[in-house]
Image: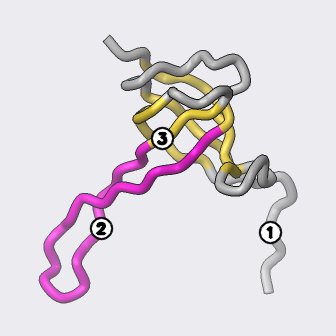
């Protein structure tokens, strides 16, 4: 069994869908997945709640989120950086 490197954390790139909560944003991550039977690519999306300490993110911003310890019942991701601001 291969040992996992200590300190490795998953990172995802997504778009902020909601910033109505205090110090929390909802991030939508989209990706393509191949259908097992029809072999056609299908767009899939998933929502993650991420911690935003400074309340800096706004709806439409492109952000990088990083996995972290559980911060609340549903929140175990943290906003690492804002890649693009919404127009």
Q: Which quarter of the rendering shows the N terminus?
A: bottom right
Q: Position of residue 64 (x, y in %)?
A: 55, 35
Q: Which residue is mark 1?
A: 4
In the rendered structure, which segment of residues is drawn in magenta? 28-50
Label 3 crowding class (10 Å Cα cut-off): few <14, some 14-19, many 20+? many
Q: Which residue is mark 2?
A: 33
Q: Is residue 41 above or below residue 50?
A: below
The residue depicted at 68 percent of the width and 36 percent of the height is 51
* Residue found farthest to the right: 6
Rendered image: mark on residue 87: none
User: The residue tagged with tag 3: helix, strand or loop?
Assistant: strand
User: The residue tagged with tag 1: helix, strand or loop?
Assistant: loop
Q: Nearer the viewer, mark 1 or mark 2?
A: 2
| Residue 79 on the magenta span | no
Q: Which residue is mark 3?
A: 27
User: The residue tagged with tag 2: helix, strand or loop?
Assistant: strand
Most prominent secondary structure in the magenta stretch?
A: strand
The residue depicted at 25 percent of the width and 85 percent of the height is 36
Residue 61 relative to residue 24: left or right = left
Foreground: 25 or 64? 25
Instruction: Please report whichever mark, 1 or 2, sits nearer to the chain's N-terminal start.
Output: 1
The residue depicted at 73 percent of the width and 24 percent of the height is 53
Image quadrant of residue 84?
top left
Q: Nearer the viewer, mark 3 or mark 1?
A: 3
Q: Nearer the viewer, mark 2 or mark 3?
A: 3
Foreground: 51 or 39? 51
Type of colouring: secondary structure
Find the distance from the CA under tag 1 to the CA under tag 2.
26 Å
């Amino acid at each position: 069994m291969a040992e996992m490197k200590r300190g490795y954390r998953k990172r995802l790139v997504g778009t902020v869908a909601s910033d109505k909560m205090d110090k929390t944003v909802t991030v939508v991550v989209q990706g393509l997945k191949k259908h097992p039977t029809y072999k056609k690519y299908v767009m899939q999306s998933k929502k993650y709640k991420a911690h935003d300490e400074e309340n800096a993110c706004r709806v439409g911003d492109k952000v990088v989120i990083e996995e972290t310890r559980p911060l609340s019942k549903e929140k175990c991701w943290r906003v690492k950086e804002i890649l693009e601001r919404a127009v």
